[in-house]
Each structure stands twice: as C-alpha cells, then as structure tokens.
Amino acid sequence: MENSLVVTIKNLVKQFPVGGDYFTALKDINLNITKGEFTGLIGPSGSGKTTLLNIIGGLDSPTKGKVSALGNSLNDTSHNVRARLRRKHMGFIFQSYNLLPVYTVFENVELPLILNNVEMKKRKAIVKEAVASVGLSNKLDSRPNMLSGGECQRTAIARAIVHQPGLVLADEPTANLDAENSHHIMKILTDLNQKLDTSFIFATHDEKIMDYLRRIIHLDDGQITEDEFIKNSKVDTSK
Amino acid sequence: MMIKIAIKNLLGARLRTILNVFVTAFSFFLILFMSAMYDGMLQHAKQVTMDTEIAGGAYWHPEYDPLDPMRFEDAHSTLPSEIQSLVDQNTAFPVLVSQASIYPAGRIMPAIMKGIKPDQNIVNMPTNSLSGHDDISIPVLIGKGMASDTKLEVGDTFTIRWLDADRTYDADEGTVVHIMDIENFKLDMGHIWIPLDRSQSMLSMEEEATYVTYKKGAPQIHKTEGWIHRDINYLVQDMEAIIEADKPGAQVMYVILLALAAMGIFNAQVLSIFRRGREIGTLMALGMTRTRVVGLFTLEGGLNALLAAAATLIFFGPILYHFGVNGIPLPIDYTEMGMIMAKRLVPIYTTGLVVSTTVLVSIVVLIVSYIPSRRIARMKPTDSLRGKAVV
C-alpha cells in the first residue's frame, strides 16, 4: 500500500506573512493520495486549494508538517531537487494555460522533453503522440494566439503529460472554458488517467467537472472538511 | 539545449527582439560613431599640422623659439651650406620670421611677419598667390581668421611697420593679395605672409632665414652648423601632448556614451524580462532551475548582443562607411576659436575601437540581462506564475 502512495501529507500548516502578522492558509492537513487517483480539491475561493496544490508540486514550501510527493520529501529539499522532481515526474495544468506565446503547439509540448534532455529524434514522435492524444494534430504549427481557449488548454494538457509524469496537478483547468469544452477536457483527462495510470489532482470549484472525479476533498478555511470517494463517477473504473 | 531555447525565444519574440536588437545596435552605432569622430578630429588636427606646417621636419636657427616673439629679432642668419643645398634642390624652403605692427583701418595690431618662398610646394599653403605682384610694394597673404579680425579684404592696403637688422623701424604699404582658407589656425591668427626676398630686403637680412622646413624623405643633414634639427616627432609633440591630455576627456565621453547605451539596453531588457514573469514561473513549474532560468535570459542577452553587432553592420554599416569616406561638414568655422578643426570631419574606425566597443557593449548587455533575470528568478515560482510584479 505504501508503495502506491503518490502524495503523503502529515500535519501540514502553511502560513503567509501579512503585514506584521501571519495568515494561516492551511491548517493541520493530513492526506494520502495513491497512484492512479483522480482527485479534486474542492472549495470556495481562499479555502487553500491552490496553496495545497503548489505545496504538493514543490512550488511552495510548508511552514510546518511533512509533505512528500512521489517518494520525495519536500520539506528539506533544495529548489534544484524540487525542480528536478517536477521536471521528471510532474505535470502542471494552469487555469490560464501558461503556454509560452512565442512557441507553437509543437514547441510548447516539446519543452518538458527538451528540459529532460530527450533526444531530438525521439522527441518528435513523443510530441506528436501527445498532441494527437488531445486531438490537436492539425494545430502543431499554430501559436497560442491562433488557438481557442479549449485548444490552448488541450495543448497545456499535452505538455503536462508528454513526459509521462507520475502526477499531474491541475489548477482550475476548466475555469476559463465553456461547458462543452470543459467536458471535452475532462474526458481527455479521464482517458489519460486510465491509459497512463497517472495520478491527477485538481483544484477546482467548477461544478461541471465534479461528476468526473473519483475522490473529492472538500476544503474550507484551510482545513479538510470532507474527503469522499465517488462511486458513480463518469470515469470508467472497470479497467 | 539552453542555446536552442534561447534562439527559439529570440526568434519567436519577433517585435520584442527587433526592438531590443535595434536599441542595442543603435547604441553600438552611436558609441562607434562618436568615438570614431573624436579620433578622426584629433587625427585630422595632427594631419593638418603636418600638411600645412611641419612637412618632413625643420631646421631651426639656434635662437628661434616660436613661443617667444621677443627673440625673433636675433633668430636669423644665412643658411648653413648643407641646408642651403636642400633649399637649392627644392626639397626645403626657408622662412624668415620677425615681429611687425600692422595698421589696418588705422588701428594698430601686433603681427608675426613671415617671409616665405612663393614657389614652395612642400607645405599645403597657397603661397604662389604671393608671386607676380611687381606693382605692389608688399604683397600680403593672410588667413580667413586674420582677415576677419582686421576687417581686411583682398586688395585692401594697410601699413606694416617692422624693426630691421640695423634696429631701425621702417614702414611700408602692404596689400592683401589673397585670403587663404586654412584649417591650421597657427598659420592664420596674427600672421601675415609675404614673399621671402621682399622680407629679407625689408629686414636687411639678405639670404637669411629663421627656419627651414624640409620635405618628407629629404636626406638628413649632419653638418647643421648650430642650427637645430627638429623632426616630426618633436614638432608634433605639442599636438600629441594635447591629444594625450585630452584622453581622459575622451574616455569620460566614451563612458558616458556607454552608460547611456547601457541605460537604453537595460530599460529594454528589464521591460522585456519583467513582462515575462509568468513565463519564468511556467519554466520553473516545468522544472527549470533558477540557475538555468538566469542562464537562459543571460544567454538571450548575449545572443541579442550578437544580433545587434550584425544589425549594426547591416543597417548602420553603410552610414558609417559613408561618413568614413565623405566625412561630415561642420556648420561653423572653428578656426577662429583657435582650434584645428576640419571643415569636414572624417571619423576614423580603428580595429581597436571596433573590437573594444563590441566587447564592451556585449559585456554591458550580458550584465543588464543577468541582473533583472537573477532578480526575477529569485521570486517564488508561485508569485511568478501569478505574474506578480517584481519589487
């Protein structure tokens, strides 16, 4: 069981300095996420979803408590070690896509492979496969400003999964999309989850995507108020 | 890998890259051009002095000191035989120097009266204008500056008074036969030039001279009979001393130009890099380390400098070449201000100047790329991702 743990959080507290005082964004969080989970962190704005996601991704550090992701402790590790962890084993999907505007779809998706020193010959095939998996094969040479919001987010998804990470962290991935695109994106993500056996953690308050989640962790005021496993999820768990 | 990403970023950014490269190239051009103009100005002053005054060098009467007019009356004698033979071979010409007073329009003015051979062609002076004036008592050649000071024009006459060899004052009418437009103010301001034989007879110094200027490449005289050999190095030493003394000024100007360029480049780079905060955050989220982020942006700066050097060559090269060949006409005559300044300034681009400017501008670009990128890379990735402003 321990080996299948992707994220382990024990007594996590996160505080931010505000003026001369501290604002506690996360209070005593305890959480385990196993391999292949399709989990949502749900809660209103300011409940600590993004902060928790950032800490799991090593983009931010905990104030107290222990956090480990993919077997690596994130408490005492340097920036470089955390960067390496993200580069090799994590993927990120952002609300506003964060595609590099001067790169084409191909180049944006290729970037994690370049950072991981994957050979050029292999890169081409891998990128094409990833882009195909999100249905954008005909947009390989397009720049982000030539794409719709849904296409941008699909590009961001391809970028997040191109190096086959063990964990994908998605911060409000459907917040900027309409209902149709949101469902399309979630469908792609659930397919990838099953195909790649990659764990997905979403921070969201978008009602539209709740049906796709297999586990929903409710956050309020920096605390986990409810942690439920969903049986009637739209995700096919029959595999 | 980094170089590939950097090239991709530069080429992909298009307008931003064009603006950055243009600012850098323009700074490059300005520094190069201004420094070359300055070098050209100094070089020109030296060249003009050599063309119009020094030629290959001179032999001075032992008493002659150009800075002490009180000694002119003792600084004359017949020429030593070997020097005379140079004159006879037309490889040198004698000049007789004396003090005089002139009275243009009734005003008294001190002047240095120099007798020169009208047919000399060793220095670039229109002395031939002094010949063929048998009907004129004393044909006089003056410079534009002197003409302006004395309000004299061609054909005007004025009284010249001088002290002859017998220490007797004498006077006669001089007539301006030509006003020369010469860049060497030392031959213009306070000078009147008359034919040598006329000055010798006026001063009762037949066959005598104060100094002899010889052609470049003329044989060296060893038996000078007390006359002092002044080679080019000696004669340009004042000019070189002025240039040397002016070097700190030139360096200050260079530093100011470089600082201005650096500010321009810094502005462009800071704006460019700080606008890319979210991009930096994304790169960090994708696993790029801070060191690599700083390296990437510094590398982009370096490539920017390379592109700027190429752009300077392509876009400003023809302008630099044009000015290098044709020079730039100056709007005013600096001769009257006591400066040897060309009417048309020609910049001089030395290899040293081009190389040092290229290296310096490149270093400046690297530094101004490194500083803001290091600062932004120090931000928390979460802040960068939010596009939070750098403070």
Image (tube, rainbow, N blue to C red):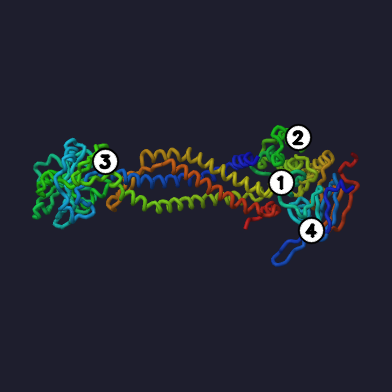
Image mark 4: chain: A
Residue placed most toward the observer, B97 or A152: B97
Q: How far apart are the alpha carbons under marks 2 and 1?
A: 22 Å
Alpha-carbon distance for marks 3 and 4? 91 Å
Q: Pick the quarter of the image with the C terminus of chain B.
A: bottom right
Are callouts 3 and 4 both on one chain? Answer: no
User: Are there few (<14), some (14-19), or many (20+) residues within 10 Å of tag 1?
Assistant: many
Instruction: Have a look at marks 4 and 1 and say if they share a chain.
Output: no
CA gap, disc 1 and disc 3: 71 Å
**Mark 4 lies on residue:** A47
Residue B145, percent across and down?
24, 50
Q: Which numbered mark, 3 or 4, is in the foreground of this view?
A: 3
Both marks 2 and 1 on one chain: no
Decide: few, some or many residues near mark 3? Use Cα within 10 Å; few <14, some 14-19, many ≥20: many
Q: Amino acid at mark 1?
A: Gly
Q: CA distance from mark 4 to mark 2?
A: 37 Å
Classify mark 2: helix, strand or loop: helix
**Circle 4: residue type:** Ser
Q: Position of residue B35 (x, y in %)?
A: 42, 47
- Which residue type does callout 3 highlight? Gly
| Closer to the camera in the image, A131 or B158 | B158
Q: State whether discs 4 and 2 lie on one chain.
A: yes
Horizontal side, residue A19 vs residue B144: left or right: right
- Mark 2 vs mark 3: in front: 3
Please rate how many residues cluster around mark 4, counting C-alpha atoms within 10 Å: few if below 14, some from 14 to 19, many from 20. Answer: many
> Residue B154, can we see it?
no
The secondary element bearing badge 4 is classed as loop
Q: Are marks 2 and 3 on the same chain?
A: no
Give the labeled residue for mark 3: B56
Foreground tag (4 vs 2) = 2
Using the image, name the chain to which the residue with label 2 belongs: A
